[in-house]
Image: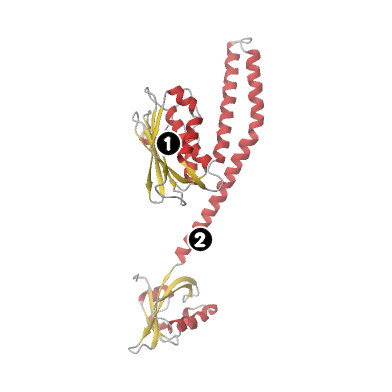
Amino acid sequence: MLNSNDAIISKTPDGIITSWNAAAEELYGYRAEEAIGRHIGLIVPPEKLGELGEIMARLGKVTGTQKIETERLTRDGRRIEVEVRISPIRNASGKLIGASSIAHDIGETRRMVRELAHTVDNLAKSNAELEQFAYVASHDLQEPLRMVASYVQLIAQRYEGRLDNDADEFIGFAVDGANRMKNLIADLLKYSRAGRGEAFTEVNTATALEEAMANLQFALRETAAGVTHDVMPRISGIPPQITELFQNLIGNALKFHGPDPPRVHISARRADARWEFSIADNGIGIAPEYRGKIFEIFRRLHGRGKYPGTGIGLAICRKIVAHHGGEITVDSAEGQGATFRFTLPEYVGSDPNNCVATST
């Protein structure tokens, strides 16, 4: 598409410039009277001069427009990156009598693309280093923490009631702190592993859901929860991570329920080449200002005394969904339950309508 900033130049088959518009003056720095009558090599770097003959040779054989990305020289000696579209000019008998070129500067675009690629590369390296640090730190901390927790618990068993009330309270704080640190490190290790490695394969989400429900069986019985679902599709992904995704979201609904027993419904619908899943519950809901924050690592909206956990479950969900190329969001209001929505890629090797029905 022609742009008002495009440099338009016409030349003879020998490369002599015959027209030079205002945008060409702006792009290359030469006024029209300085350029017209001179050879097009005026703006071509020495090592690119061979392009000119090749272009004219091709123009003599084809009728369409050629497009190249190359370098050109400005009047002050700067090299600029340009995209040039070159069309043949023929007379009434079809003889090639010249060429018309339309060029525009792509240097800024290319610079931005290079910077973006560099930034993405740096982010990938940084994320990999952070994940490796989190894994090593949490893994290496487990053993000394296990020793601290064991000895603190031993002190509690041996000396509880034998010292004063303050001592018993201090020992209780130490035991609780050690246990919480142990849980935090275990969850940090789990987070560092989420959304990593492993090739994608066909995942029967009905099976993944059944495994998640089996892992939650005690919480389901304890809360008298009811979980229902629609027909579940086959998707492309990493099976253990899909199970963990369902387990965390359903477990979240079981944990944050109101006075009534939890009710959870899972549904799925096709959206282009993906499946959009919804997990709706009748729980306590989430205030609008917290909808984005709940996916942050270790983010808690309630005190530990009321609801257990470290606040990492939804962060793991976001990481798993992102690794599968999708997004996760939540629709909710306080006291009106919550609906978590996320997308996962469909399994390319199967019928798009290939779903599996199971009962829960």
Where disc 1 sits, the SS reads loop
Q: Report x, y in % for residue 355.
A: 41, 43
Characterize the local packing of mark 1: few (<14), some (14-19) or many (20 or more) Cα atoms within 10 angstroms: some
Residue 66 higher or lower than 172, as above or below: below
Could you tell me the amino acid type at mark 1?
Answer: Thr
Q: Which residue is mark 1?
A: 358
Where disc 2 sits, the SS reads helix
Q: Nearer the viewer, mark 1 or mark 2?
A: 1
- Residue at x 36% of width, y 87% of height: 94
Q: Earlier in the sequence, mark 1 or mark 2?
A: 2
Q: Nearer the viewer, residue 122 or 223?
A: 223
| Residue 155 seen by the camera | yes
Q: Nearer the viewer, residue 349 or 226?
A: 349
Q: Report x, y in % for residue 196.
A: 55, 45
Disc 1 from disc 2: Cα separation: 49 Å
Residue 61 higher or lower than 213, as above or below: below
Characterize the local packing of mark 2: few (<14), some (14-19) or many (20 or more) Cα atoms within 10 angstroms: few
Q: Which residue is mark 2?
A: 114
| Residue 306 seen by the camera | no
Instruction: Kindly indicate the quadrant of the structure image that contains residue 156.
Output: top right
Residue 24 higher or lower than 318, as above or below: below
